[in-house]
Structure formats: C-alpha cells, structure tokens
C-alpha cells in the first residue's frame, strides 16, 4: 500500500494579466505622460521669477519681494495699460529685471505737466497717489511708436522708469513678460498682481 504524503500542498496558479488590467495600466501611463508634458509647459512659461529691487512699485510690491513672470502671454496679446511688466532696460542682458506698470501703449502721447501725467490730452491725476516731482524726458510730449511702451513705477517719486533718459520708451522685445503673482512679504501675503 502506498503511503500518502501528509500536510498541506499549494498549487501555484499561472497568473495572467487581463486585458482590463492592461488597459488600466495604459490609461495611467498616458495620464502620467500628459501631466509631465503639462508641467514642462508650465515651468517654461511661468517658471521665471524675479525679486523686486527698490521701492519703485510700493505699495503693491515691496523691495525684495519675489514675483512670478508669465513669459508666454505677450506672444499672443500686447501689453495693456495697467499691466505690471518685467523687462531688461534697453535689452541689456546683464542688467537686473525691472518691474514697472504700463501707462502708455503704442500710438499714445505722453507728457508730464505740473506733476500730473497727461495721456492723450487727458489728465491721469488719480493714477498716482502723489504728484510727480520729476517729469524727466516726459516734460516734452512723447509719441509712442509701434511696439513702444511708456512704463512707470507705482511709487513714481522713487522710480527709475521711462522718464529716465537711460531707459526711455521700452520696446516690446525688451519686455520679458507679465508679472502675475507675488510671493509673501513681511507686510503682504501671496496674491495676484493688480
């Protein structure tokens, strides 16, 4: 008589990956690739950041505060009045980034008279919280050519901007992008730039 083996025996089943599992894995891989591509586009377009140097944009932006720059938007649209833009003065790649507000766009006439910005013959007295002490090159009427912008700091009496002869009107090619988000500072939290 033959003796039976006592104890437990385990049979290993051959494991197969079903078509449903393969489809699910494929979907996850596709989503991962799309997420990586989207992240690369966002980092390229919005990944640039710079620090504010000086008090020229107070009270909106303060010295040392970091801002994120949208480098793609001006490939599709032109800067508009009120936009806060980042540029290199005269396209100088060795200069630090300047952050200023657009007050004049191509075709506008700009002049500063009696401490008030005159834009296309209209007084912009309420644009700045104080009278402009130094008109600079804008004491004479300036007509902005195609692709030229007149930029000023919000704190106009503590700003080197388009009124300065060494900066002047800023060409669109010198504009790196639009400042769209600022990091927290001692006085302010995170937020979009107005």
Image (cartoon, grey):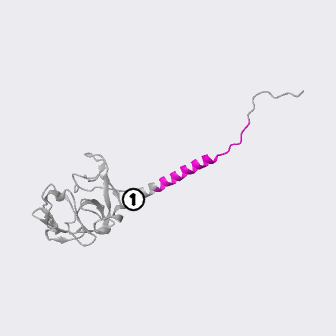
SS at badge 1: helix
- Image quarter hosting the N terminus: top right
In the picture as drawn, the residue positioned furthest to the right comes out as 1
Residue visible at 74% across and 36% down in the picture: 11
38 with respect to 155 (left or right): right
Residue visible at 57% across and 51% down in the picture: 26
Q: Is residue 134 visible?
A: no
- For residue 5, what is the image quadrant? top right
116 with respect to 23 (left or right): left
Residue visible at 30% across and 68% down in the picture: 172
Q: How many marks?
A: 1
Residue where numbered disc 1 is placed:
45
133 with respect to 16 (left or right): left
Residue 27 x/y as whole percent = 55, 50
Which residue is more in the foreground, 19 or 184? Answer: 19
Residue 165 x/y as whole percent = 20, 69
- For residue 40, what is the image quadrant? bottom left
In the picture as drawn, the residue positioned furthest to the front comes out as 20
- The region drawn magenta spans 11-37
Q: Is residue 178 visible?
A: yes
Q: Is residue 179 above or below residue 187?
A: below
In the picture as drawn, the residue positioned furthest to the left comes out as 114
- Dot 1: few (<14), some (14–19), or many (≥20) neighbours within 10 Å? some
Which residue is more in the foreground, 179 or 1? Answer: 1
Which residue is more in the foreground, 47 or 78? Answer: 78
Residue visible at 26% across and 62% down in the picture: 80
Which residue is more in the foreground, 110 or 24? Answer: 24
Whether 176 is among the magenta residues is no
Residue 129 x/y as whole percent = 15, 54
């Amino acid at each position: 008589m033959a003796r039976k083996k006592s104890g437990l025996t385990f049979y290993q089943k051959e494991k197969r990956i079903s078509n449903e599992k393969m489809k699910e894995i494929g979907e996850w891989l596709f989503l991962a690739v799309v997420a990586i591509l989207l992240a690369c586009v966002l980092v390229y377009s919005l990944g640039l950041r710079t620090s504010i140097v000086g008090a020229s944009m107070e009270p909106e932006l303060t010295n040392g505060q970091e801002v994120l720059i949208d480098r793609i938007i001006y490939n599709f649209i032109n800067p508009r009045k009120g936009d806060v833009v980042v540029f290199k003065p005269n396209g100088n790649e060795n200069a630090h980034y300047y952050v200023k507000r657009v007050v004049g766009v191509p075709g506008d006439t700009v002049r500063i008279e009696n401490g008030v910005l005159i834009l296309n013959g209209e007084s912009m007295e309420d644009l700045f919280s104080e009278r402009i002490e130094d008109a600079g090159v804008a004491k004479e009427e300036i007509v902005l050519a195609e692709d030229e912008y007149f930029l000023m700091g919000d704190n106009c009496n503590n700003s080197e901007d388009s009124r300065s002869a060494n900066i002047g009107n800023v060409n669109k090619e010198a504009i790196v992008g639009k400042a769209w988000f600022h990091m927290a500072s001692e006085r302010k939290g995170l937020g979009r730039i107005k």
